[in-house]
């Protein structure tokens, strides 16, 4: 029998595809309520209790200083070896609190979803965000969901804000950095940027390089436990997580703040073989590539080794190392001693070397 | 890392430096042709280490630096066309044409994609049949085989939505052109190891014969470079001029025959405009007529600007396919990239260097490209 030129079917639209996020999911109606109640809230429930969300989370009474931060995540691709945008959104904000000397407590999480995002993708991202929050003992207490038409976003964007309790004393501040001070990284540099780049550009590296995405609270806390950052004795000038622009960007910021030259020894900087190899291949400098679980620390002269030993108590900073020191202002704000012994300026990263890595 | 640290060993490097010092009796002037070597020499501090005995003049071997501004302008025009995407290597996107770059075209709504291989651009064409993918094919003999392969692959797949905007250049004719400039002070050349991996080094024999100038095929790591420099100054001190291969772990005399065959099948040698240097006879490749369907200048002929006239430009040269001043000196009064590319001045001798010209707001291509000499000096030698 000849097929008719038209398709027989119900003239009424079937409505949104059940396995994808549609604009209707963001319109405030039944679909949105179901998305929130079924897909989002259960993952972030406290003590197994799923409550209808009020307009604002009420936080308990509290004395002492608070740290507050916010960050947006637009990483592409959404999933990469060692993590995904959900885990990154929680860890990134927690790390901003941790390096400010705070214990992360509460987090808000807002989603901007592109119409058509498969629901399993959203669920998987939310699951790993919830997992990251559980691991670190922080509560996701507020959130928002918006859906934008296809093409107005790229899959999924997440914004998180976080509040933490400052555990005194915080670092002294980069303006207190002095000649003689020592510079330390908590682990191999550049892993996150390389992992994203390799995944995005399908570089086909085997095994694929993994991100270092992990919470930095424990490594920082080792400095408290060992008495290096306490009310009696604080040897820590500054701590920063080396995200966009990598270690180099922070060195330049600190140099500007203190007015001295910060110098690193190329051979002392820890890198993984896959980061080094990929960076060579692509003409990139690992010191300029983003990390998501590695920090730079400036400490007073003479305590560098003690700080490294303290950091090595935490699994996240087993490969911590002293990479350089601070000097009177010399030939450039930041310099590097190459393996052949020459000292050169280490320039700030310029332009969009690796866009959308976090 | 394996095969990296071995060629960066500080003790061996120091020995080679000492050996070079013992060998030279007077200041020698060498040119490394390739931008990759320029960066390595500066990054590892070799240029500074040797500056009192060996002056290293940085040659024009930075492919995106010598890509004519007019080709970049045309690529931008293509990117802004509906249903046309321009794909190229990341470096190419930031290089300004006569005023703007491909990145600017993208921010104006043009479609510009970064790929790591021309074959990825073929894949793009395959998976986007409603888009025409133009691959901006730049580079020396090293990249020409892969772009030629892309054409053969597209032809094999019967793709009609794929073409190349070709700006491939050849090293040897540029070295020839440099030697013929009266100001040229170069006594010996470090030839680019990766180019010779493809081409071999037979073709340098005539060059050496003609100019009595040693050519040493050299690699890119610190020990490779020091070893190449030592070979070159040894030849100069003993009055020899030969072609020697100091990058034997990659280069064979005859080069890579299958790569050469692919290039020969798809391209023919042509007089080509080098930005900052003008038209160099036989200085590049163009697609053979039988592949004209893959030639973006042919496919989008109607978009091209009419040719300039002799009256408009004193150095008008009929060979220039881009139809405008081929000498490249008209682009910016401030930018002296032509003199940098030909080794007449060092980047810091240009008044604009580090003041009105920096990687953030480059006036000329050598400040943009990862292989450009100005960018290398800005990155590794600038003092603030």
Image: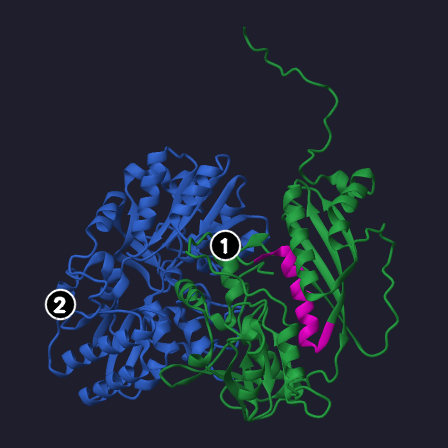
- Using the rendered view, name the quadrant where residue A13 is placed: top right
> Could you say whether the residue bearing mark 1 is in a helix, strand or loop?
helix
Residue A153 in view here: no
The residue that disc 1 covers is A199
Task: In the picture, one chain is blue; tell me its letter.
Answer: B
Identify the magenta region: A83-103
- Using the rendered view, name the quadrant where residue A131 is placed: bottom right
Query: Image check: B66 left or right of A179?
Result: left
Residue B137 is situated, as x and y percent measured from the top left of the image, at 38, 51
Residue A193 is situated, as x and y percent measured from the top left of the image, at 52, 63
The residue that disc 2 covers is B210
Residue B222 is situated, as x and y percent measured from the top left of the image, at 31, 76
Q: Is residue A100 magenta?
A: yes
Residue A271 in view here: yes
Q: Measure the C-alpha gap from mark 2 to mark 1.
A: 50 Å
User: Could you confirm whether marks 2 and 1 are on the same chain?
Assistant: no
Q: Main secondary structure of the magenta part?
A: helix
Residue under the point 79% across and 45% down = A37
Q: Is residue B378 magenta?
A: no
> Could you say whether the residue bearing mark 2 is in a helix, strand or loop?
helix
């Amino acid at each position: 029998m000849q097929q008719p030129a038209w398709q027989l079917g119900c003239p009424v639209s079937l409505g949104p595809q059940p396995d994808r996020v549609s604009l209707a999911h963001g319109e405030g109606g039944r679909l949105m309520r179901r998305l929130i109640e079924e897909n989002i809230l259960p993952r972030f429930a406290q003590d197994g209790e799923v409550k209808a969300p009020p307009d604002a989370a009420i936080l308990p009474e509290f004395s002492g200083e608070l740290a507050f931060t916010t960050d947006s995540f637009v990483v592409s691709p959404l999933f990469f070896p060692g993590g995904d945008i959900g885990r990154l959104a929680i860890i990134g904000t927690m790390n901003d609190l941790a390096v400010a000397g705070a214990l992360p407590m509460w987090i808000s999480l807002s989603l901007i979803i592109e119409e058509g995002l498969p629901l399993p993708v959203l669920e998987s991202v939310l699951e790993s965000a919830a997992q990251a929050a559980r691991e670190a003992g922080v509560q996701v207490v507020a959130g928002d969901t918006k859906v934008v038409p296809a093409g107005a976003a790229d899959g999924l964007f997440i914004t998180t804000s976080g509040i933490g309790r400052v555990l005194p004393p915080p670092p002294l501040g980069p303006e207190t950095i002095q000649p003689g001070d020592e510079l330390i990284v908590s682990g191999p540099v550049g892993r996150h940027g390389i992992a994203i780049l390799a995944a995005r550009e399908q570089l086909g590296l085997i095994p694929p390089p993994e991100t270092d995405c992990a919470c930095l609270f424990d490594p920082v806390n080792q400095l408290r436990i060992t008495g290096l950052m306490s009310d009696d004795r604080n040897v820590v000038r500054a701590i920063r997580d080396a995200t966009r622009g990598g270690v180099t960007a922070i060195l330049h910021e600190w140099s500007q703040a203190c007015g001295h030259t910060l110098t690193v020894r190329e051979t002392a900087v820890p890198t993984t073989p896959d980061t080094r190899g990929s960076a060579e291949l692509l003409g990139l400098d690992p010191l300029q590539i983003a990390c998501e679980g590695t920090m730079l620390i400036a400490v007073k002269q003479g305590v560098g080794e003690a700080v490294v030993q303290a950091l090595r108590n935490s699994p996240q900073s087993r490969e911590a190392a002293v990479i350089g020191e601070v000097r009177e202002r010399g030939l450039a704000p930041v310099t590097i001693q190459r393996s052949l012994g020459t000292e050169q300026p280490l320039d700030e990263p310029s332009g969009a070397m690796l866009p959308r890595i976090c | 890392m394996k095969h990296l640290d071995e060629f960066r060993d500080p003790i061996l490097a120091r020995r080679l430096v000492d050996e070079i010092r013992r060998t030279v009796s007077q200041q020698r002037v060498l040119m490394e042709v390739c931008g990759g070597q320029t960066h390595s020499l500066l990054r590892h501090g070799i240029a500074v280490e040797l500056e009192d005995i060996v002056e290293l003049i940085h040659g024009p071997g930075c492919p995106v630096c010598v890509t004519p501004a007019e080709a970049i302008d045309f690529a931008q025009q293509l990117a802004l066309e509906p249903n046309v995407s321009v794909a190229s290597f990341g470096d190419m996107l930031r290089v300004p044409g006569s005023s703007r770059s491909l990145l600017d075209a993208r921010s104006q709504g043009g479609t510009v994609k970064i790929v790591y291989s021309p074959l990825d651009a073929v894949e793009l064409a395959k998976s986007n049949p409603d888009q025409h993918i133009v691959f901006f094919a730049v580079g020396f003999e090293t990249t020409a085989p892969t772009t030629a392969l892309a054409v053969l692959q597209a032809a094999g797949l019967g793709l009609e939505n794929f073409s190349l905007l070709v700006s491939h250049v050849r090293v040897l004719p540029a070295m020839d052109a440099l030697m013929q400039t009266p100001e040229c002070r170069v006594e010996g050349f470090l030839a680019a190891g990766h180019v010779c991996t493809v081409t071999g080094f037979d073709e340098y024999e005539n060059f050496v014969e003609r100019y009595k100038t040693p050519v040493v095929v050299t690699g890119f790591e610190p020990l490779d470079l020091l070893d190449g420099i030592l070979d070159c100054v040894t030849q100069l001190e003993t009055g020899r001029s030969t072609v020697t291969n100091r990058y034997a772990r990659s280069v064979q005399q005859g080069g890579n025959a299958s790569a050469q065959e692919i290039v020969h099948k798809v391209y023919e040698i042509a007089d080509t405009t080098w930005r900052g240097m003008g038209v160099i006879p036989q200085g590049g490749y163009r697609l053979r007529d039988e592949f004209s369907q893959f030639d973006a200048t042919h496919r989008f002929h109607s978009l091209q600007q009419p040719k300039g006239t002799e009256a408009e430009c004193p150095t008008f040269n009929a060979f220039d396919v881009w139809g405008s001043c081929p000498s490249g000196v008209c682009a910016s009064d401030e930018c002296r990239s032509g003199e940098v590319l030909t080794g007449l001045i060092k980047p810091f001798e240009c008044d604009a260097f580090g003041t009105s010209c920096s990687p953030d707001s480059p006036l000329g291509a050598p400040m943009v490209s990862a292989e450009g000499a100005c960018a290398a000096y800005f990155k590794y030698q600038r003092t603030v």
